[in-house]
Image (spheres, rainbow, N blue to C red):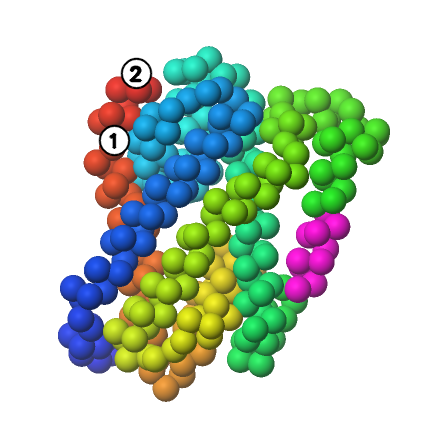
């Protein structure tokens, strides 16, 4: 097995692969920080983007352990530096995670509809999840806007401040701000697959990649299938697809952590 995988790695033009992945990962850091910055400015305090970027980037180091821990570090910074109550900052981080779920779900639903016949049956439930989640969103939105009167003590808790303040434009803005990441990923993954010997079009990848991202983020059987989906989709190249899935994910995670190390000293000064 190892000699076979070594042969696969030898055949990849790694300089070209890096020329795709490095700009994509850098774009992710910038846009992800941009989303955090906008949400914090909306719901917590007027902060500068250049102050948020090193904190968000450094949080990727903690995200190697747990993404929620990374967002907790952002909350700690805002609480110490700007005097924002920790629960209210936590509310903004919760709002971001809520929007991230719906962003992934929307793209994954489109992907399933485009590639229905090629995807494993377990993913056919995604449109149903989207339908239920849409109903849940409407109920949550109406609840926190006060249209649904019941449950006022829960609604008034500091942890849900962002949801009380947020209008539809805030939800929509986060989805729009994050959209370039998925569009860039689709192009990058299509080109990167070509370096591993698999030629696919952008439209075909649009059917696969959002499903991979959504499934990998979900617990349970869908997660188990998503992490090996490239091998399932292209069974004639199991070695190449195993290597592809491995390097795409791990380079992304480690690159972000490396960026975090670059900004770590500045972030620590801000937290001091």
Q: Earlier in the sequence, mark 2 or mark 1?
A: 1
What's the magenta region? 127-136
Measured as percent of width and height from the top left, residue 65 is found at 37, 43
Left or right for 204, reference 130: left
Residue placed furthest toward the bottom:
236
Would you place residue 51 above or below residue 237 in this image?
above
Regarding mark 1 in the picture, which secondary structure is present there? Answer: helix
Task: Decide whether residue 271 is among the magenta residues.
Answer: no
Q: Is residue 45 above or below residue 71?
A: above
Q: Residue at x 72, y 27 (%)?
A: 155
Residue at left 25%, top 73%?
Answer: 195
Res 259 → quadrant: top left
Name the residue located 25 percent from the left edge and 54 percent from the top edge.
22
Nearer-the-camera pick, 170 or 125? 170
Q: What percent of the width, then of the height, locates residue 256?
A: 30, 45
Disc sitting over residue 272 in the figure: 2
Whether residue 153 sits left or right of residue 42 in the image: it is right
Q: Residue furthest top?
A: 83
Crowdedness near tag 1: few (<14), some (14–19) or many (≥20) residues, C-alpha within 10 Å = many
How far apart marks 2 and 1 lie (CA) works out to 12 Å
Q: Is residue 22 visible?
A: yes
Q: Where's residue 270, x and y in %?
A: 30, 20
Q: Main secondary structure of the magenta part?
A: helix
Locate residue 162, reporting x and y percent: 60, 29
Give the residue displayed 43% in from the left and 59% down from the top.
Answer: 183
Helix, strand or loop at label 2? It is: loop
Marks 2 and 1 in Cβ contact (< 8 Å): no
Q: Residue 264 — which label?
A: 1
Mark number displayed over residue 132: none
The image shows residue 25, relative to residue 18, as above or below, that is: above
Q: Quadrant of the N terminus?
A: bottom left
């Amino acid at each position: 097995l190892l000699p076979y995988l070594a042969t696969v790695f030898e055949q990849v033009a790694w300089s070209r692969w890096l020329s795709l992945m490095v700009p994509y990962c850098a774009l992710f850091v910038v846009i992800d920080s941009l989303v955090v910055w906008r949400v914090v400015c909306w719901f917590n305090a007027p902060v500068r983007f250049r102050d948020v970027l090193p904190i968000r980037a450094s949080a990727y180091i903690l995200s190697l352990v747990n993404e929620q821990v990374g967002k907790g570090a952002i909350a700690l910074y805002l609480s110490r530096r700007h005097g924002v109550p920790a629960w209210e900052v936590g509310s903004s981080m919760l709002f971001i995670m809520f929007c991230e779920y719906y962003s992934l779900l929307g793209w994954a639903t489109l992907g399933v509809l485009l590639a229905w016949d090629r995807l494993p049956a377990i993913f056919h439930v995604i449109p149903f999840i989207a339908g239920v989640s849409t109903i849940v969103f409407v109920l949550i939105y109406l609840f926190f806007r006060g249209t649904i009167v019941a449950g006022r003590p829960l609604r008034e808790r500091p942890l849900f401040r962002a949801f009380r303040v947020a209008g539809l434009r805030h939800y929509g803005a986060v989805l729009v701000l994050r959209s370039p990441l998925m569009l860039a990923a689709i192009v990058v993954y299509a080109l990167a697959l070509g370096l591993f010997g698999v030629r696919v079009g952008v439209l075909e990848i649009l059917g696969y990649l959002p499903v991979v991202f959504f499934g990998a983020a979900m617990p349970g059987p869908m997660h188990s299938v998503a992490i090996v989906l490239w091998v399932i989709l292209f069974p004639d190249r199991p070695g190449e697809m195993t290597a592809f899935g491995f390097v795409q994910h791990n380079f992304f995670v480690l690159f972000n952590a490396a960026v975090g190390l670059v900004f770590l000293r500045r972030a620590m000064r801000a937290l001091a």
